[in-house]
């Protein structure tokens, strides 16, 4: 965490003795800061300025309002101006934009957007929670009618009206991240045909590419068209009505409406104009108490940089959990309490048409980007509960951990049931700087309909411990095309016949003890089965017989995902 100075300034006060705390932005970070501060200090005056018409609305719920899952717009209003006034004695001024900060005089300029008039307001403490704005690339056609971003209630209201009035049948979603995918789900719920245009060759950029493969397959199976590895070039209006999204490749994707969901950018114009420093990731620089280098100004939420607890590097993370926690920390700091924001670890989940995708900590590509090389990974595909209880559904799980200490670095999971529960457990372990030994030992809920005596989290930890102890050395899938090792597939012949790794040799686990003499002693053996379990048993048996053995972690199931995204040929 950055440190701006060794000590705090004396809490400022005005002549009347009543401190004035002004908050810019009245949604996740701003609203939680206001409410927490009031709970800590009855004496301060708190005023929240919000540019939009609503305070504390559920922006995370907006896609579901488009999809009519939430049909009553009022459900999105978590709190109202009136509630802030009566319950917390907080003055919320909506449709009021803060346009300038004069730090030396400790005043801000605010403009009433209804009347267009401006005035100044004095502060003793100022909190910035302006959020992040959807990126609108400067490309032809992005401002055409029928092209939408999703940030506010009026945005989603406009999309709903457009669908209804135009009888929209086809949508193109540009961007395959969280918000794009939530829009895919909700537009499908409105029975629109949906195409996703994504510049990267995979959906969900925070995931490693092979972990996005089950998601991509699932979307295609549910009728969503994917156009991956191709960027947006322009959007054209058709004479007969409707739009055409033109990709960089020249592909033309017809649409009745277009959703732009290519990411967000921290709203830092106000801070920058006031001379507050921005970090290398473009967010406002704050310390662990969410204070900017100006001792009277704090900043929280999507607009700030925070340290990543895994890589230690500063990052911007536009998620509601960190924004709420940071708002709370800023309130505590302003109230003079000892407090500290721990950092972020990118714990996130998205549900798309019955599939859940969740992740926490660093991805493999994120670790490489951060220059962290000493790590290992395991893949596993356990059922979400005991296999003997009807309805067990696989969870595809990847766990990354450092070597040799086993510290958990990150995890990603995809499946239909129990996915976010496992990622939440691992996320908590990461927060406590836990190791894979902790996951192996974790005592978790078990009854047949919920889990297994060895929960997927335990299994992930146990596999990783096996890697660390050398009981189950793992092979690097990316070396598959270059290795001299004999790839030995220990599944049954009919499973092998249904599909296998090129050049693999089949020797089923059930025959391994009797046919061990057929195996060459001089070659490395890389073992594969469906998910890695039988290969592990074979690894233990052969290792103890003096063979040099490695396990292809996650087995043929992982192989098909890696092949599906081109990581292995
Ligand atoms: P915001 O909540 O965006 O609030 C900032 C407010 O400041 C805005 O209302 C803006 O009008 C106002 N403002 C900006 N500048 C000024 C100014 N100069 N004067 C006055 N007011 C100003 N996160 C999750 O963790 N899970 C999810 O499922 C999820 N889903 C999402 C779905 C959508 C469609 C969107 C848009 C976001 C979603 N998020 C989700 C992200 C989450 O909403 C944000 O991370 C969070 O709201 C950030 O809080 P914030 O206070 O920084 O900014």
Image (cartoon, rainbow, N blue to C red):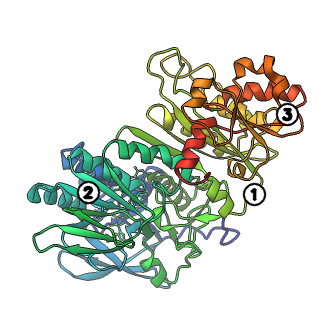
Contact between marks 2 and 3 (CB within 8 A): the answer is no
Residue drawn at 74 percent across, 45 percent down: 407
Q: Distance between the residues labelled 2 and 1?
A: 51 Å
Q: Nearest the camera: 189 or 440?
A: 189
Ligand 1: quadrant of the figure: bottom left
Residue 78: horizontal and vertical position, in percent? Answer: 30, 48
The residue pinned by badge 2 equals: 81
Residue pictured at 35% horizontal, 50% vertical: 182
Q: Mark 3 highlights which residue?
A: 520
Q: Characterize the local packing of mark 1: few (<14), some (14-19) or many (20 or more) Cα atoms within 10 angstroms.
A: few
Q: Is residue 248 above or below residue 458?
A: below
Distance (Cα) linking label 3 and label 1: 33 Å
The circle drawn on residue 39 is none
Residue 246 in sight: yes
Q: How far separated are the C-alphas under marks 2 and 3?
A: 76 Å
Q: Is mark 3 on a helix, strand or loop?
A: loop
Mark 2 vs mark 3: which is more N-terminal? Answer: 2
Residue drawn 54% across the image and 19% down it: 386
Front label number (3 vs 1):
3
The circle drawn on residue 373 is: 1
Q: Quick one: SS at disc 1?
A: loop
Q: Where is residue 352 in the image (x, y as percent from the top left)?
A: 37, 44
Q: Against 251, is 389 above or below?
A: above
């Amino acid at each position: 965490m950055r440190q701006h100075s060794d000590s705090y300034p004396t809490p400022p006060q005005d002549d009347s003795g009543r401190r004035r705390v002004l908050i810019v932005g009245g949604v996740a970070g701003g609203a939680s800061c206001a409410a927490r501060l009031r709970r800590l200090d009855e004496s301060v005056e708190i005023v929240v300025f919000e540019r939009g018409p609503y305070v504390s609305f559920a922006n995370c719920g907006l896609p579901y309002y488009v999809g009519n899952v939430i049909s009553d717009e009022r459900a999105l209003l978590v709190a109202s101006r009136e509630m802030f006034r009566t319950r917390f004695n907080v003055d919320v001024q909506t449709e009021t934009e803060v346009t300038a900060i004069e730090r030396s005089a400790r005043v801000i300029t605010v403009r009433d957007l209804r009347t267009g008039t401006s005035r100044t307001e004095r502060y003793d403490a100022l909190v910035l929670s302006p959020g992040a704005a959807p990126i609108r690339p400067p490309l032809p056609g992005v401002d055409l009618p029928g092209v939408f971003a999703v940030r506010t209630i009026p945005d989603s209201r406009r999309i709903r009206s457009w669908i209804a009035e135009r009888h929209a049948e086809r949508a193109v979603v540009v961007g395959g991240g969280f918000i794009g995918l939530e829009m895919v789900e909700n537009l499908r719920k409105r029975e629109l045909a949906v195409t996703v245009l994504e510049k990267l060759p995979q959906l969900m950029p925070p995931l490693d590419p092979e972990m996005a493969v089950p998601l991509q397959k699932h979307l295609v199976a549910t009728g969503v068209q994917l156009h991956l590895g191709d960027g947006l070039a322009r959007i054209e209006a058709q004479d007969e009505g409707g739009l055409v999204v033109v990709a960089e490749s020249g592909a033309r994707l017809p649409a009745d409406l277009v959703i732009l969901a290519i990411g967000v950018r921290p709203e830092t114009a106000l801070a920058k104009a006031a001379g507050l420093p921005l970090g290398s990731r473009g967010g406002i620089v704050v310390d662990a108490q969410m204070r900017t280098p100006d001792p009277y100004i704090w900043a929280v939420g999507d607009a700030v940089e925070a340290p990543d607890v895994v890589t230690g590097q500063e990052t911007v993370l536009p998620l509601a959990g960190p924004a709420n926690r940071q708002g709370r920390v800023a309130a505590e700091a302003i109230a003079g309490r000892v407090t500290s924001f721990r950092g972020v670890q990118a714990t996130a989940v998205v549900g798309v048409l019955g599939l859940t995708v969740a992740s926490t900590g660093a991805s493999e590509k994120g670790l490489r980007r951060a220059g962290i090389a000493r790590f290992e990974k395991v893949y596993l595909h356990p059922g979400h509960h005991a296999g003997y209880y009807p309805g067990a559904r696989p969870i595809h799980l990847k766990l990354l951990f450092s070597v040799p200490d086993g510290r958990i670095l990150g995890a990603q999971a995809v499946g239909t049931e129990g996915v976010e529960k496992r990622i939440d457990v691992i996320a908590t372990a990461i927060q406590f700087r836990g190791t894979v030994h902790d996951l192996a030992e974790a005592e978790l809920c078990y009854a047949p309909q919920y889990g297994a005596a060895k929960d997927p989290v335990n299994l992930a930890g146990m596999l990783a411990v096996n890697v660390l102890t050398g009981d189950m050395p793992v092979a690097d899938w990316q070396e598959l095309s270059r290795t001299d090792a004999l790839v030995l597939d220990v599944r049954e012949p009919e499973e092998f016949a249904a599909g296998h790794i090129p050049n693999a040799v089949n020797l089923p686990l059930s025959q391994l003890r009797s046919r061990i003499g057929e195996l060459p002693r001089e070659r490395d053996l890389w073992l594969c089965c469906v998910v890695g379990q039988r290969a592990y048993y074979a690894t233990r048996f052969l290792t103890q017989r003096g063979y040099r053995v490695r396990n292809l972690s996650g087995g043929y199931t992982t192989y098909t995902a890696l092949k599906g995204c081109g990581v292995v040929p």
